[in-house]
Image: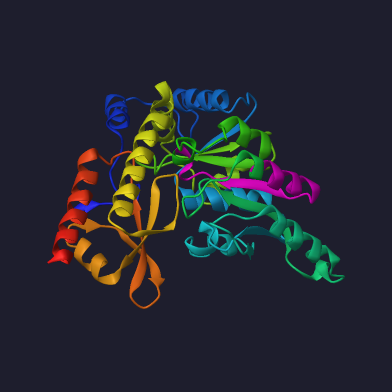
Amino acid sequence: MTYFDCDYMAGCHPSVLQRLNLTNMECTAGYGLDPYSERARRLIRDLCACPDAQVSFLVGGTQTNATAIDGLLLRHQGVIAADTAHINVHEAGAIEAAGHKVLSLPSEQGKVQSQVLENYLQQFYADDTWQHMVQPGMLYLSQPTELGTLYSLYELEHLSAICRRYHLSLYIDGARLSYALAAEQNDVSLADLARLTDAFYIGGTKTGLLFGEALVVPRPNTIPALFSLVKQHGALLAKGRLLGLQFETLLTDQLYLSIARKAVSLAQRLKNAFLRSGYTLFIDSPTNQQFIVLPNEVIEQLHHDLSFELWGSQGENESVVRFVTSWATEEKDIDALEQCLASLKTLQKK
């Protein structure tokens, strides 16, 4: 079986595992107060061109989102997000569990459009009863989006300007940020994110780490008592050096980007294989997630040799499926997919 279900199915990059093994018997201070974590923080600050940034290492994406959003919002505020956003669909109500409503807006290709955001905010404050409502306090975006699409620098600058005008925090979920940075069409840098947002995170779980995310707060103390909030949300690792060491390894010698570029390149090859076989895209993604519209009988046949996710029906006879490459995907995996498609085409001709 060849697996394309998600980008965190394999363990971790061999370089990360080697570093963990070599340092396994070292004794260091806990909770990220170790030399490895501090070196990782310095690397992140340098990459973000933000020497004063507050950098915290958390155990996972849901915990990072819940911690950052809870810390940036006041008790009476909610977070604006695309209707397809991870926090709105796939985090089991983690944001609502902390007392903050997700205020979903219709999206286009997974993205919040600046005019839609502007219209929503204008209409909200035009209502004389707005103080009786859940008040918007933040805009949540993800880069790339849940559909693998990218915000351009132009789009992010416009959204950031609207946030500033309406006194909203801007937070970006970077679970797959490496694959966005590695995409050929991308024009957004880590330094841009540090300049335009109030907080964002650099995903590690989906880019070669066993686990872990790096939350970046460009202006220190934007989130008061962040350390305590991280612990309160169950995101603080006692053996914190395991996170710092992994990020230090990932961000040294551009390993983070090189493994993401490989995954994105293979994802584009995968996409082209489906297009050559006559199938259509649900959405044209430049990153490591690919969404294809396939006849249901084709899906059944492919599932004999390939593992991938169903994303929803598309009429009575077709469905949208998601194929995801990762740092661990190899050329032979795409070879196997191409062979499956070729065999299927041969059977259909008979």
- Stretch of the chain drawn in magenta: 156-178
Q: Which of the two residues, 2 or 268, is positioned nearer the viewer here?
A: 268
For the N terminus, the image quarter is: bottom left
Residue 99 point in image, percent of width and height: 63, 63
- Left or right: where does residue 267 sit relative to residue 340? right
The one nearer the camera, 284 or 156, is: 284
Question: Would residue 105 be found to the left or right of residue 149 on screen?
Answer: right
Image quadrant in which you'd find residue 53? top right
Q: Nearer the viewer, residue 140 or 310?
A: 310
Residue 244 percent location from the top left of the image = 44, 31
Q: Quadrant of the C terminus?
A: bottom left
Relative to 198, say whether 234 is above or below.
below
Residue sitting at the far left: 350
Towards the viewer: 95 or 280: 280
Q: Is residue 165 magenta?
A: yes
Vertical arrangement, residue 340 with respect to residue 19, above or below? below
| Residue 169 lies in the magenta-colored region | yes
